[in-house]
Amino acid sequence: MFFNKDEKALLIPLYKRLLRSAGDSISTADCRKLKNHLAKAAQESCLPRNNFDMNPVIRDMQTAIIISEEIGMKRASILGIMLHDAVKNNFLTTDIVRQEYGEDVAGIIHGLVKVNELYAKSPMVESENFRNLLLSFAEDMRVILIMIADRVNIMRQIKDSPHEEERIMVANEAAYLYAPLAHKLGLYKLKSELEDLSLKYTQKEVYYEIKEKLNETKASRDRYIASFIAPIQEKLGKTGLKFTIKGRTKSIHSIWNKMQKQKTPFENIYDLFAIRIILDSEPDKEKQECWQVYSIITDMYQPNPKRLRDWLSIPKSNGYESLHITVMGPEGKWVEVQIRTQRMDEIAERGLAAHWRYKGIKGESGLDEWLTSVREALEHSDTDSMQIMDQFKMDLYEDEVFVFTPKGDLFKLPKGATVLDFAFHIHTMLGCRCVGAKVNGKNAQLRQVLNSGDQVEIMTSNTQTPKQDWLNIVTTSKARTKIKQELKEIAAKQSAFAKEMLERKFKNRKLEYDEGVMMRLIKKLGFKTVTEFYQRIADETYDANEIIDRYIEQQKKESEVREDPNRSAEGYNMQMPGADERAEKEDVLVIDRNLKGIDYKLAKCCNPIYGDDIFGFVTINGGIKIHRTDCPNAAQLRERFGYRIVKARWAGKSSGTRYAINLKVVGQDDIGIVTNLTSIINKDEGTVLRAINIDSNDGLFSGTLTIMVSDTSKLDALVKKLKTVKGVKQISRN
């Protein structure tokens, strides 16, 4: 019963394919032990299906094939994938795995189990777990690669799944987390596939419209590519170079991206394809032969110097090496040409894993640095999770600038990095003491943006300390994290000093210090935190003696209330700020599994009311905006900021609160139609007409009615009544 009919048909071919791909990295003894463990785990129901009802053994084999064939990792990763479910569900322990299969396999399983725990309740990681997820990734690069392969596999398999909502969640997460990770690790092929499938599941019409247009233009595109390649092939053939040339159509997602950025239709996108020339070169002749091809092509076709991308001289931090040029081809069309060797092409296709095959030719220090910075930013940060994730995604996609120290050491930074970013990148203490720099021998301010090739000498002062406005100067998450840590420490020291000084003044005036009275006074003065209050005393915004006077006054008032229990209620008002508002909201809305104390607002773009299907969107300042699921902005929010989406639903009953909504009315301009509409609204109990705006033209009218209504059932009943008015053609909610 563990395998259904279709799964049985898949099992043997998948098993044979996996064995062929793994080669001699997996021994007969490994296979025997693995079969035995999986069979027993299945018998004891320790291998459950996922949210899409996928068989775990089939799914893991498919993921292992992607890891082996498309990324190039073998034994430890394959066995880790196949066994992690058995460990996660307590059939095997990591100690047993270590004894039977080795430390490497146990290490991978440890990372996979940690990641899977975060996905236990939902197929999409919730925002509060995002940081933990990335930390698990940063512990072992192989865990990232396996999770990317697993997500590619799931995305390939769920095209016919009936679980529409979960498919959209998984697709959104693939676009905002796994595609950028694949990009950073150089897995460009898998990155494009994740983006395309995500677009297919979340915006089906857009995807198929572009696909159809690509199919319509395929024949003419193929003819053009052939005519462009022919003379290059002939010229390169005479040089004696070994090479292959192929034309590659750009991914549907990247075409859609260009249409969005340039605000232009499909027909106006000129660079729908790129030509790739792949050389079979000896390691010591790679650069020389790539530049030779560059010279030949630019002699034949006019190059665009602004579009030259040289990743031969200084590769990207993910190991990507290639030479990109854009030339004017026949019919005045711009064509992108990518020149690289077979080794470079394999690294571009397989990313990080290909480095292991070519170890010794190129190092992986750039990736190690990046993962270290991810770890630092996540482990030490006390800032809002949402801001960290935004910064993380930005760091993933950012291009790099290459900056030199006076001694000639090379450092890679994200594009847009400043002098201050560079100082913190070298060392935290250097950043904290930085007062400026000499860039290419000229004095430069902290906020100066660095360019590739700049030589930077950091200037310091022992009296310098981090300032709050430095957070507006830096762009890297590492510098931002370090500055916040330093500012927090400075604030803590100043607050401790201010508190000590205040308590000393209490003793001098022979006053007893009551912590409770002081806390109530701090709240009354409008401070959100005690630290902030003491900070104001430290920077002398508040006078300590004035605070003591206010404290005595507060103490006196409280003692008066205690002494006179029969005091009249008149003139006595003690309110908790926002308490009423909060109580009302918590009666009506449950956000993200009933989290308490969350500040939320109803989005103006779609005006949700009680009873609508809704979701929450976490804003930068930590508040939550509530949107309708059919909000015009919903698709974009889910695609670009999927990790900020939280579940929300209405709870209990509508408490009588009225919500403003707009109704669009279209109809014939009959005499008295407006009067009839307003009369129905005014007679409707619990509904209030706030505004009406009508335009009439050629016997037709269209207008907007702004009404206050308590819930969707009331709204539906009202719309039904309004539709009975003679002449009304259409009523819709904006």
Image: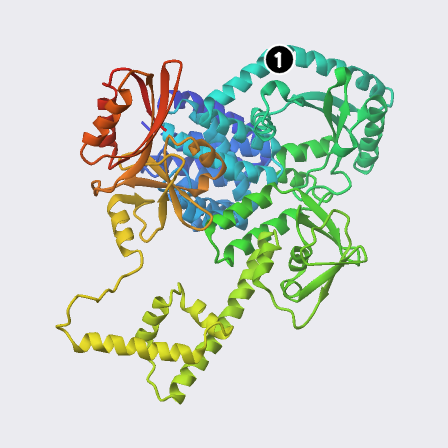
Q: Secondary structure at mark 1?
A: loop
Q: Is residue 64 visible?
A: yes
Question: In the displayed structure, would residue 249 be above or below residue 124?
Answer: above
Where 37 sits versus 296, above or below? below
In the rendered image, residue 334, in percent from the top left (x then y), is placed at 73, 23
**Image label count:** 1
The reply, left or right, for residue 191 in relation to residue 700 is right
In-front residue for pair 86/614: 614
Query: Is 22 placed left or right of 416 in the picture?
Result: left
| Residue 428 horizontal side relative to residue 242, left or right | left
Q: Nearer the viewer, residue 493 or 575?
A: 575
The residue sitting at 60% across, 30% down in the picture is: 189
Instruction: Look at the image and tell me in which quarter the N terminus lies.
Output: top left
Residue at 36% over, 19% down:
701
Quarter of the rendering containing residue 359: top right
Q: Quadrant of residue 298?
A: top right
Res. 296 image quadrant = top right
Q: How is the image coloured?
A: rainbow
> What residue sits right under mark 1 in the picture?
217
Residue most extreme to the left? 566
- Asked if one can make out residue 99 in the rendered structure from this viewpoint, the answer is no
Q: Position of residue 185 (x, y in %)?
A: 61, 40
List x then y, in percent, for residue 591: 32, 45
Nearest the eye: 77 or 385: 385
Q: Position of residue 82 (x, y in %)?
A: 46, 37
Q: Residues within 10 Å of mark 1 (few under 14, many from 20)?
A: few
Q: Amino acid at mark 1?
A: Thr
Q: Quadrant of the C terminus?
A: top left
